[in-house]
Amino acid sequence: MPTIPVITIDGPTASGKGTVASRVASHLGFGLLDSGALYRLTAFSALEANVELTNESALADLAGKLDIHFEGERILLSGREVSNDIRAEAVGVAASKIATLAKVRSALVTLQHDFRRMPGLVADGRDMGTVIFPDAPLKVFLTASVEARAERRYKQLIGKGFSANMANLLQDLRERDERDTQRVIAPLKPAEGAKLLDTSHMSIDQAVEQVLGWYHPAP
């Protein structure tokens, strides 16, 4: 049975990895896994159900029962589109907090593995290449300066109708970076053999072109 190819794209918050992953998947005809959305979806579900963000067992139970479908850049939760809802800053902050919980991460591992289907998968997140798909033939670590990322997030939020403050975004990104890189479980770092891609001064199209240039399908 042929190995199902996977391209992993890891990186910090607002580095552009989600958009790059979506476009690479579309170009190749591969499936897409936005793993960060899984944590946002868990956080969103917890906030809706009034589950405390410190209740690890209840959060893990919620995570294990998520009914998720990705349709391009649309995200469906139990058939309901929540693409914009889960991008709210309160959800992002909650997601960053619950992502440090071992039971939540464990509950989402099987769910993430289930996305690996023919003809292939592009998976973006923070531990796709280090933990979830360490055998991926192409692993990319995509980053950008915190200033560039804050500007992108600001434009993204304003474009979606959310209010945003640049100073608060900068502080929030720095705090998330510290949480993501310093956590004991699956800290954010480049996977062994990962290609490093700094997009601070690159367009999305240039980043997509570079990732596609690095991908060489198995014969």
Image (cartoon, rainbow, N blue to C red):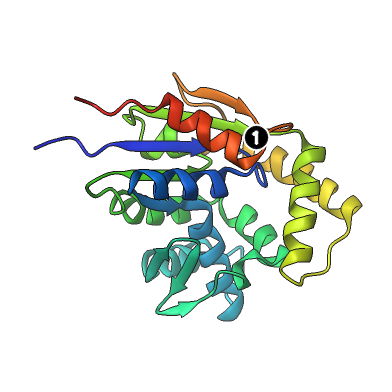
Which image quadrant is residue 54 in?
A: bottom right
User: Which residue corresponds to the image point at 64% horizontal and 54% vertical from the top-left?
Assistant: 97
Q: Which residue ends up furthest to the left in the rendered image? A: 1
Q: Residues within 10 Å of mark 1 (few under 14, many from 20)?
A: some
Residue 149, image x and y in percent? 74, 43
Left or right: residue 185 versus residue 154 is left
Residue 73, image x and y in percent? 50, 61
- In the picture, the quarter occupied by the C terminus is top left
Residue 186 shows in this picture: no
Q: Is residue 141 above or below residue 60?
A: above
Which image quadrant is residue 189 in?
A: top right
Residue 211 shows in this picture: yes
The residue identified by callout 1 is: 182
Q: Nearer the viewer, residue 161 or 178?
A: 161
Residue type, mark 1 in image:
Gln
Left or right: residue 5 versus residue 19 is left
Q: Is residue 177 above or below residue 108?
A: above
Q: Nearer the viewer, residue 182 or 191?
A: 191
User: Which residue corresponds to the image point at 44% horizontal and 32% vertical from the top-left?
Assistant: 212
Which image quadrant is residue 51 in?
A: bottom right
Q: Nearer the viewer, residue 133 or 61?
A: 133
User: Which residue corresponds to the image point at 28% horizontal and 48% vertical from the top-left?
Assistant: 116
- In the picture, the quarter occupied by the N terminus is top left
Residue 26, image x and y in percent? 41, 50
Q: Is residue 202 above or below residue 114?
A: above
Mark 1 element type? helix
Q: Is residue 216 above or below residue 114?
A: above
User: Which residue corresponds to the image point at 52% horizontal and 58% vertical from the top-left?
Assistant: 37
Residue 188, image x and y in percent? 58, 35
